[in-house]
Amino acid sequence: MMQLEDGHDIIGLCGFDNPMRDQKTEELKKHIGQGVKIKMDDAGNILIRRYAKSNVYVKSTASHPNEETSIGADILKLPNQALESEKIVKLFDMKKFQSNVNRELRRAYPDRRRLETQCLSAVAFVKSENDILECPIWVLIVNVVAMDMLKSKLPPGNCSINARNAAIITLLNNSHAGLEILESGL
């Protein structure tokens, strides 16, 4: 179990001084209080419970707004993905991730990066912005178990062709001159 709070125990956001920290962040940090508790269950889901009196938001790490994520369905239903107090919800849904991996593997050119991004969970405290980098206080959680599962199903060396390269290869294959360039250029 991991606990994120304003204190110095477990993983405390106030554990280290930062002379470069802006005043706005310093003020907002005082509102985190008991923060959140995060743990992984036996199925590989990451569960989160909000203890903070102030808001806690789950942010998508997807590149595009309509892109698939592995964020739990209960969180996606919440306004602004703002966690309810004392309620346990799935931050990372392993079944959803496995389904997304299987769907991606059926594509002609699987995009490993799209799946790796789903292994990241971003949580913002107190205040939410559209861009996670604009949020004054946030953490990024890397699901190493999901990354290992992805590595076993789609090894890094097997996905050298991404969507952009696939489009280039398709264009080259559609023209005779392109084939000559492809053969001599590679």
Image (spheres, rainbow, N blue to C red):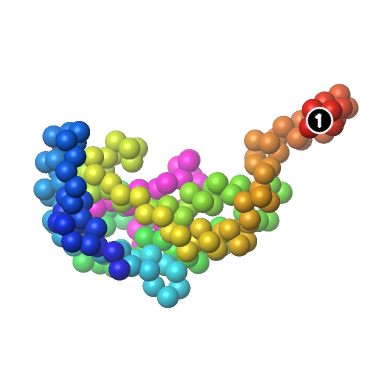
* Amino acid residing under circle 1: Leu
Total count of labels: 1
Q: Report crowding for label 1: few under 14, some 14 to 19, many 20 or more residues within 10 A (C-alpha).
A: some
Q: Residue at x 23, y 49 (%)?
A: 125
Q: Is residue 70 left or right of residue 9?
A: right
Depth check: give the residue in front, 4 or 97: 4
The quadrant in which the C terminus is found is top right
Please say whether residue 82 is one of the residues in the magenta stretch: no
Q: Residue at x 68, y 56 (%)?
A: 106
Q: Secondary structure at mark 1?
A: helix
Tell which residue pokes out farthest to the top in this image. Answer: 177
Residue 65: x percent and y percent?
45, 42
Q: Residue at x 68, y 42 (%)?
A: 161
Residue 149 visible in rendering: yes
Splitting the image into 4 quarters, where does residue 47 fall? bottom left
Write down the residue under mark 1. Answer: 182
Tell which residue pokes out farthest to the bottom in this image. Answer: 42
* Residue stretch in magenta: 56-75
Residue 53: x percent and y percent?
14, 57
Q: Is residue 107 left or right of residue 140?
A: right
Residue 155: x percent and y percent?
63, 55
Splitting the image into 4 quarters, where does residue 46 fall? bottom left
Residue 73 visible in rendering: no
